[in-house]
Amino acid sequence: MGTVIYQAVDITAGYGKKIVLKNLSLDLEQGSCTFIVGANGSGKSTLFSVLTGIKKMRSGQLLIDGKIAEARQLQKQIGYVPQDNPLFAELTVKDNLLLWYGGKEALQKELTGGVIEKLGLNEVLKKRVSTLSGGMQKRVSIGCAMAGNPRILIMDEPGAALDPECKEILYAYLADYRKAGGTVLMSSHEKADLEMGDMVYLLSEGRLKERNTI
């Protein structure tokens, strides 16, 4: 067993009178890759929004290193790639990245040997996001999410818009990220994706059920 660095404990969340997550708990170990699967509308995006601190929960706790995590700590420790790319379409790739990295100096460190180079973004830095393919936009979103070197990377179905070449680049990056101690949590409908995970959970009726250990 590895070191558990992030925990969701008895999380309940929903919208209005509708309860989506019911006393849900999840442990993430350092260096692990965990998948969440489930039918459309099962609550995967809601779960990720809660885990990243975007959506408030009705009850429960989020802990990092065994201590209750505040919103600011979640923002610093977690990189999040939602289904819809959070990018400014009319800005260049470089300008989008600068907004997340907070300046040229921090971004420059990632252009050679860092996440930007590993994701193959150097060649499109001057292009507007609106001119890029869906797969390349997803890579830019991941590059933005990795600003500040978060310990945990959460991705909501990242492979949906990726062609085989983009997937290969993404998975190679994730392998390096995990070797360096990074922790990955993501959702996917694709069986091939699940093979790279350590654990797969099924989200059903507001709770997680261990589906498979790989």
Image (spheres, helix red, strand yellow):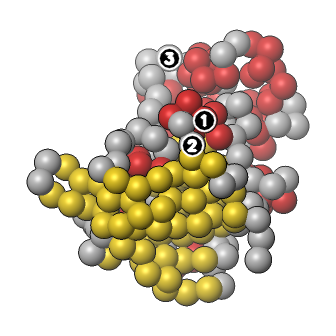
State the count of labels.
3
**Residue 75 occupies quadrant:** top right
Gap in Å between the C-alphas at discs 1 and 2? Answer: 6 Å
Looking at the rendered structure, the secondary structure element under dot 1 is helix
Q: Is 95 in front, or is 213? A: 213
Q: Position of residue 136 (x, y in %)?
A: 56, 41
Q: Residues within 10 Å of mark 1 (few under 14, many from 20)?
A: few
**Where is mark 2, residue-wise?**
69
Q: Is residue 96 above or below residue 177?
A: above
Q: Position of residue 168 (x, y in %)?
A: 69, 60
Residue at x 80%, y 28% (from the top left corner)? 111
The quarter of the rendered structure image containing the N terminus is: bottom right
Q: Is 89 in front, or is 20? A: 20
The quarter of the rendered structure image containing the C terminus is: bottom right
Q: Is 160 in front, or is 65? A: 65
Q: Is residue 96 above or below residue 18?
A: above
Residue at x 64%, y 73% (from the top left corner)? 197
Q: Is 68 in front, or is 38? A: 68
**Where is mark 1, residue-wise?**
73
* Image mark for residue 91: 3
Looking at the rendered structure, the secondary structure element under dot 2 is loop
Q: Is residue 112 left or right of residue 134?
A: right
Q: Amino acid at mark 1?
A: Gln
Residue at x 87%, y 31% (from the top left corner)? 112
